[in-house]
Image (cartoon, rainbow, N blue to C red):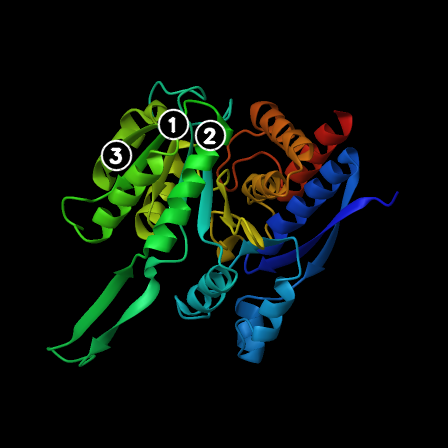
Amino acid sequence: MSEKSYKIAVVPGDGTGPEVVAEGIKVLNAAAGKSGFSLITDHFPLGGDHYLSTGETVTDETLGRLRSYDAVFLGAIGHPDVKPGVLEKDILLKLRFTLDQYINLRPVKLYDGVYTPIKDKSPEDIDFVVVRENTEGLYAGAGGCLKRGTPDEVAVQESINTRKGVERCVRFAFEYCRKRNKRKKLTLCGKTNVLTYAFDLWERTFLEVAGEYPDIETDYAHVDAICMWMVKNPEWFDVIVTDNMFGDIITDLAAMIQGGMGIAAGGNINPEGVSMFEPIGGSAPKYTGKQIINPIAAVSAGQLMLETLGEFGAAALIEAAVMKVLKEDIEDVGAGKMGKTTSEVGDLIVNYILEN
């Protein structure tokens, strides 16, 4: 019987992206080898350098090719010589929207040995997941500008929320909360007292779908309250579901309480199609080639990819190795303070996997 394999499209991207992606692939191959399957990787040169040399961001042909893969593994997009917004909109958002990756999944977990700025909180207190709607809201690009550059300039940016988009996100969150099987509590994060149209739709949909999940406890909090409680009492949360913009904001706050961008990983999920996985941090161009960026966020993105593909045993091998490295081998997860190079951290994780 032939060995099971997965086709992975690799987008190393810009800045330090290729460095952390290399470690992520190294770890993924070790975990796959130990678990009886293999990864077939193809690299795609999307990012700032490609754009500057060709004028292309991502072509329809490339998008068509990506649909044939089991997953996409992304490093980072962002180049100092490209105007902010060009690559983000024309590559990142285009990939998410075209591949209909309507869920942004962000596990928030504090590991033993990792510093959190929240006083007296431990790994038992910080272990929750944010489910962010990923293809609608303010990021849909609806709106426009009149009389640009004049004293009478008007800019309008509209938040688009459809019943279909909201319901499939909410339903995913309920299902994920049930499968996660921890506190079995789902919190809707919104702003019903001000955004009365958009979050009326979110709240009504949330309550209607909740009727199908009597085993899941539900509650609601305004986004500003979520930010307060995430700092004061993160142990209150199990799974949070929210819209695109609020999800973008609260997951950066969440990254800080779990130890910083060197730890945080996420997935852009299409449960019926091709999903994309990435470290949350940016391309950090000033550190390019210095081998001082913590690759664990990229490694954990690979772990999330394997979980989404159903390879839970291999994913568990990665998480156990990451936990061991964080507890025993890294001085500080911040850039330049690890006491190890980027590749040395990757090697340590691989060694722990192979020893398991």
Numbered mark located on residue 147 in the image: none
Q: Residue at x 51, y 35 (%)?
A: 333
Q: Residue at x 30, y 44 (%)?
A: 205
Work out which residue is located at the far left of the displayed protein and give it.
152
Q: Which residue is drawn at 41% across and 42% down?
A: 171
Mark yes or no: residue 16 visible. no
Q: Is residue 81 left or right of residue 42?
A: left
Q: Is residue 277 left or right of residue 134?
A: right
Mark 3 sits on what residue? Answer: 220
Indicate which disc, 1 or 2, sits on the residue closer to the N terminus. 2
Q: In terms of image quadrants, where is residue 13?
A: bottom right
User: In this view of the protein, which residue sits in the foreground, 70 or 234?
Assistant: 70
User: In this view of the protein, which residue sits in the foreground, 263 or 217?
Assistant: 217
Determine the secondary structure under disc 2. Answer: helix
| Alpha carbons under labels 2 and 3: distance apart | 18 Å
Q: What residue type is labelled 1?
A: Ile
Mark 2 sits on what residue? Answer: 178
Q: Tell me: residue 300, above or below residue 95.
A: above
Q: Where is residue 309 in the image (x, y as percent from the top left)?
A: 63, 43
Indicate which disc, 2 or 3, sits on the residue closer to the N terminus. 2
Mark 1 sits on what residue? Answer: 216
Whether tag 1 and tag 2 are in contact, CB under 8 A, the answer is yes
Circle 2 residues within 10 Å: few <14, some 14–19, many ≥20:
some
